[in-house]
Amino acid sequence: MIKEIILVNPRGFCAGVARAVKILSLAAQKSREPVYMRHEIVHNRRVVQDFVKKGIHFVENISDIPRGATVVFSAHGSSPQLYEQAQKRHLTVIDATCPLVTKVHLEAKRFVDQGYFVIYLGHKNHPEPEGVLGEIAKDRYVFIDSLEQAKKLRLAKNETKLVILTQTTLSFDDTKDIISLLRRRYPQIGMPPTYDICYATQNRQNAVKELVKQVDTVLVVGSKTSSNSNRLVDVAKNLSRRAYLLDRVADIKDEWLTRCQKLGITAGASAPEELIAEIVDHIRNQYGGKVKELEVLKEQVEFPNLPKELGQL
């Protein structure tokens, strides 16, 4: 039986996700016509399913949206090419991109305009890099997703103006070795004014580092497609703790918890608090355990500004 369940803070929704969810909720409430969502609003099955119940239509291709309809672009950011496609179909676009991701888009355009060659650090098959790199001509950037790939990087000698940009859901720990290698090899390489690391990504990883000091097993509530959720599992495992990712109560396996005495629970930036509560209640009923909170840091970040297009629905 579990003796103690420790819920760590910060966990769950970040300010960017909370803003995106609010934008889509308002669009669903205000629009008299069907609302379409290009890609998942955030990488969480529960959140997406809740919006499907509210009548939101999720699509991957702009061509699947009727001409003249309303579409919301996800928190991960979208490429200029997608905006052009939407314009050709006369769509009303409501942009739910996280402001921190928007910052990287603006940096990408600024550096390219100044003649820089961009070295972009990110995860393959994630929508955020697809959006950012859409701002840059294909011959003006290279995509790096591992230290091994960085070691193999060879740039033309005439590329003297270099800059690093990173996917926001990579933490300092994720990027430090690659950046260190690149700076040794290319001493002239530039960095943005500040690291393009999402505060929530770093905060949640730091919280897990404190959590593992008090528990023997860690559960991370989040989707398999969530970059930051998967990394939370890695952080716990790298600190010699059993760690598992789950997206719903049904994902829980008995063998995860039979040897557990002190259980820690956190959640990726796309996981809603009501889902976390359901999982905690299930574990208490099945395995016991007294619940307590561990507050490592109190987050006070908010993104109150909403797209003006919401007022036109």
Image: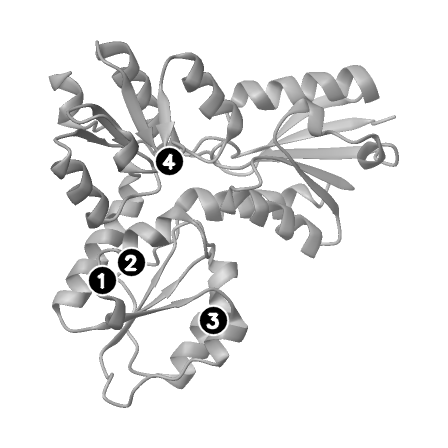
Q: Amino acid at mark 1?
A: Ile
**Residue wearing tag 4:** 39
Task: Count how many numbered circles sit on residues in the image.
Answer: 4
**Residue wearing tag 1:** 136
Assess whether mark 4 and mark 1 are in contact (beta carbons under 8 angstroms): no
Q: Tell me the quarter of the picture where residue 267 sits.
A: top right
Which numbered tag is attached to residue 178?
3
x and y percentages locating residue 145 in the rendered image: 47, 64
x and y percentages locating residue 159 in the rendered image: 25, 83
Closer to us: mark 1 or mark 3?
1
Residue 176 against residue 34 in the figure, above or below: below
Assess whether mark 2 and mark 1 are in contact (beta carbons under 8 angstroms): yes
Horizontally, residue 215 falls left or right of residue 90, namely right
Q: Residues within 10 Å of mark 2 (few under 14, many from 20)?
A: many
Tell which circle, 4 or 2, labels the residue nearer the N-terminal end: 4
Which residue appears at 21% of the width and 27% of the height?
306
Q: CA distance from mark 1 to mark 2?
A: 5 Å
Which quadrant would the C terminus be assigned to in this image? top left
